[in-house]
Image: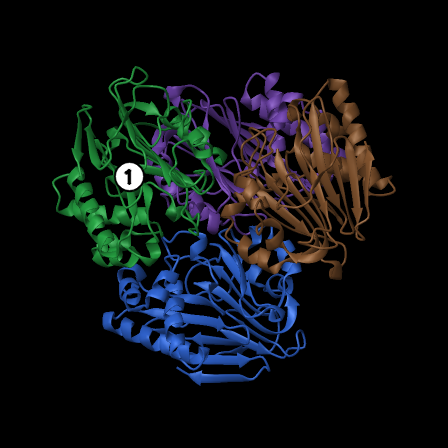
Chain colours: A green, B brown, C purple, D blue
Amino acid sequence: MCRLLGYLGQPVLLDRLISQSDHSLVAQSYQPQEMTAGLLNADGFGVGWYDSARGTEPFSYRNTLPIWNDANLQSLSRYIRSNCVLANVRSASAGLATDLSNCQPFQYASMMGIHNGLIQDFRKTLYRPIRERLSDLAYQFIQGLTDSEHLFAMTIDELETSANLTEALHRTLKVLTELAEEQQVAFSANLILSDGYQLVASRYAQRTSTPTLYYLQNDSAVERSTFIASEPTFAGDWQALPERCLLTVDHDSKLDITPI
Amino acid sequence: MCRLLGYLGQPVLLDRLISQSDHSLVAQSYQPQEMTAGLLNADGFGVGWYDSARGTEPFSYRNTLPIWNDANLQSLSRYIRSNCVLANVRSASAGLATDLSNCQPFQYASMMGIHNGLIQDFRKTLYRPIRERLSDLAYQFIQGLTDSEHLFAMTIDELETSANLTEALHRTLKVLTELAEEQQVAFSANLILSDGYQLVASRYAQRTSTPTLYYLQNDSAVERSTFIASEPTFAGDWQALPERCLLTVDHDSKLDITPI
Amino acid sequence: MCRLLGYLGQPVLLDRLISQSDHSLVAQSYQPQEMTAGLLNADGFGVGWYDSARGTEPFSYRNTLPIWNDANLQSLSRYIRSNCVLANVRSASAGLATDLSNCQPFQYASMMGIHNGLIQDFRKTLYRPIRERLSDLAYQFIQGLTDSEHLFAMTIDELETSANLTEALHRTLKVLTELAEEQQVAFSANLILSDGYQLVASRYAQRTSTPTLYYLQNDSAVERSTFIASEPTFAGDWQALPERCLLTVDHDSKLDITPI
Amino acid sequence: MCRLLGYLGQPVLLDRLISQSDHSLVAQSYQPQEMTAGLLNADGFGVGWYDSARGTEPFSYRNTLPIWNDANLQSLSRYIRSNCVLANVRSASAGLATDLSNCQPFQYASMMGIHNGLIQDFRKTLYRPIRERLSDLAYQFIQGLTDSEHLFAMTIDELETSANLTEALHRTLKVLTELAEEQQVAFSANLILSDGYQLVASRYAQRTSTPTLYYLQNDSAVERSTFIASEPTFAGDWQALPERCLLTVDHDSKLDITPI
């Protein structure tokens, strides 16, 4: 389990997104309220962002410390300003290293992604089958051990033959469901992807409870903007994304929800 | 606030002391039950131990990660065996760095020490007055910024003119009380000191609540041994050390409690 | 010993300043050519920068790893763009921790500073005398153990009663010289300070060799800009700052050199 | 490139093996003399050891910092005493993370191993072919990205059907040679393996220069003991292991050299 945050809208300082709210991502790190597994999200963190003035390749910053102990974050989050951000505080699966390579977001060309969830007994179940399906490019992309990064690698491949990010995520979840069914393996797969112009998110699980995912649009706090988060980060009219659904939101705040 | 553990008795593996019990120090790191301030003890940790076969200089191991994320600890704690151990999981005061120098235990010659508590607004109150009283030796000893290390440095000086560790700790607390009264500053000072032959502990505070401290002797789990801990680490006949008291226990399990 | 870099001029990406040149700061980390003590500068690093569009408080990023092993730096240095930068790769004095608090630059309000050099036997010589002269504000400012940070703290105090940064640095070096003479202690003090509008640098030592310091102005590579560096970072018409001199350069590239 | 050290003989303190000699592993970290690629070995390190009194499972300690900056190592290496040790200071291949999972030694059941060398363009050449040959057990064993860990995983599989460690290493190198020939890929493979009773080492390369490897037996410094090292760690009658050879030494100091 992790806690996710996605933002698309007016440019804001990172500080405002991850620290400056009642139940900020930092607070969700040491005191989350809706975890379905795990107690804390203190096994590293990461944030990725786009700079619309400088093309489509995103930037990222990750650390293995708990987010509240990163001495650089205060300065960086006062400096970095973005209209499109993904952030993650990590709760590692038992036995997995706190290596930087296991921290999110993952990034491939202009795409970034974060994941909250898990694949049951991943290393003994779908680890090898997922890898063997990957193109060489996606295979070589993987740096760490997490189920999360393997889902992202699957998306890299699906994107090659998909019309857009939403379709790529949808197809990734279909393939994952088939692989999981073969071995009767439970999984949960709340993901948020971005290419800098849109956010695409899923709330989805099989054979286990589905983690929460909320969204908020055009709140008075930040007009013409969309938030997606595992837990609401401040008081507002947050909506629960229905289970087994995909959410797509683009730069004009147009929002679509489709079943998976 | 931190959580403390002291052990004196039959040689045991570190693993058994800090990991292998229902409410081990590792569990107290992510789920403490009797904290008077703070939620977690995830801002680093440390363990110190003596090897009675190899003289009086202690050994120590510290890390800035949460204790549950130290990938080396499993191997080290299966290897290290000792009859006299101090261990600490840290909850940093707001704004203090997670630098290794701020992790406990502190060590000077054959003495080690750990502290749970705090001095109110330390840097603006007693930081400079305490330092200015120190001998050059104790002054130069200090590596970090914590109130804890400054209390330990005071003890280094008091030990010079004290008959034993107990008297040195007693006198340190007397001086601290006087300095704090001058500025009407609150503090709490649960400490455990050792020289490899005995444990000396205090449960003490002024103008604020006194953190808990328990001890257990000659439990069937580990005969002829004494545990001292902020919270009982396993079910047993733990006794609360009375407030404003010093506890001294020596290698023959002889235990004295005296008021401060 | 460390390696220093200061930059003032047209806004450039950090990447260009610290990585993209033949003898960049990264290269000076693993293969310096003009060190008077030490072999490498691999004991941490740091970079500080101003954003002229956003007021005078600077930003900074520091890490205890060798600069070439920081996995975040590539992304950060492609994102951060500044017209005024200080950077340092550290060669720790023997026995000093690689704690983040010991990494440079140091920052106080709108002032930043970096230092290359050392005070002989610092902890046993000038450590306590320097501290005892400090105002409470400068005293409480100090987070680490380095002689470098103590020189910076002295400058904080001198700035209170100085007309400008140049005078503050000059007076700091005067006081340092007096303190050092009393104890016949050798020191070297190459510093670069900034307030976002100007760079002030010293090349100075007593009773020991003076480390190198170079400057370069209006090179075709980066017009209307000034570089100051322990070693030239690329081929160009670099000038050695004479020993025992102060250099001041402002935003219009006006450059003054005065003897200390 | 890395620097390797293997030791089998009388129990000694780690300190003596890795720090206390003129050209110790620590010195080889910052000033190696016989590297065929790279300048330093400052990208992490690790040490593994056996305790003959406590069964065959080895212990290990690894860190991503340069070995000279590990603040815990002094204490640990004064405490840990062993008759069988493997140690490694790492020079990472370009682009590979300094994650702990990429540090050596690797450990499987009672076997440990360290590797100096590299497989040309590993991720694009033999990475996937090697993985696909592995048993599920060896496949799931791998935690990091290094060619070194993949060679060790191959050895895990070969050991299943080999008479001893020497044969397992020999067969691993045969398979590696075949895989490399198919793609005309250069590699170097100096390895040291142990099971606590013996050391087995290879000095071997194809299509590239063969890194150095030396051994020393029954030196007056440490009688009835064998050292194997990339570079001699102290003055003595070190012998160069011939290229394309395997060396096996057992607890009675019996030493065999066989061609590969």
Q: Position of residue B30 (x, y in %)?
A: 52, 40
Closest to the observer, C53 or D107: D107
User: Can residue C178 be seen here?
Assistant: no
Q: Position of residue A154 (x, y in %)?
A: 23, 49
Which residue in the protein does label 1 denote?
A190
Closest to the observer, A157 or D135: D135
Closest to the observer, B90 or C54: B90
Q: Is residue B248 left or right of residue A144?
A: right
- As helix, strand or loop, the secondary structure at mark 1 comes to strand
Name the residue located 68 percent from the left edge and 23 percent from the top edge.
B208
Q: Where is the C terminus of chain A found, in terms of image quarters?
A: top left
Name the residue located 49 percent from the left edge and 64 percent from the top edge.
D3
Rendered position, B260 above or below D221: above
For label 1, count other residues whose C-alpha is less than 10 Å away and answer few (under 14), some (14-19) or many (20+). Answer: many
Q: Is residue C165 left or right of residue A18?
A: right
Q: Position of residue D215 (x, y in %)?
A: 54, 76
Quarter holding residue D172: bottom left
Q: Label 1 is found on which chain of the structure?
A: A
Q: Looking at numbered disc 1 in the image, what kind of residue is underneath it? A: Asn
Name the residue located 66 percent from the left edge and 77 percent from the top edge.
D223
Name the residue located 47 percent from the left edge and 43 percent from the top edge.
C231
Q: Position of residue D23 (x, y in %)?
A: 59, 64
Closest to the observer, A99 or B73: B73
Q: Is residue C228 left or right of residue B16?
A: left
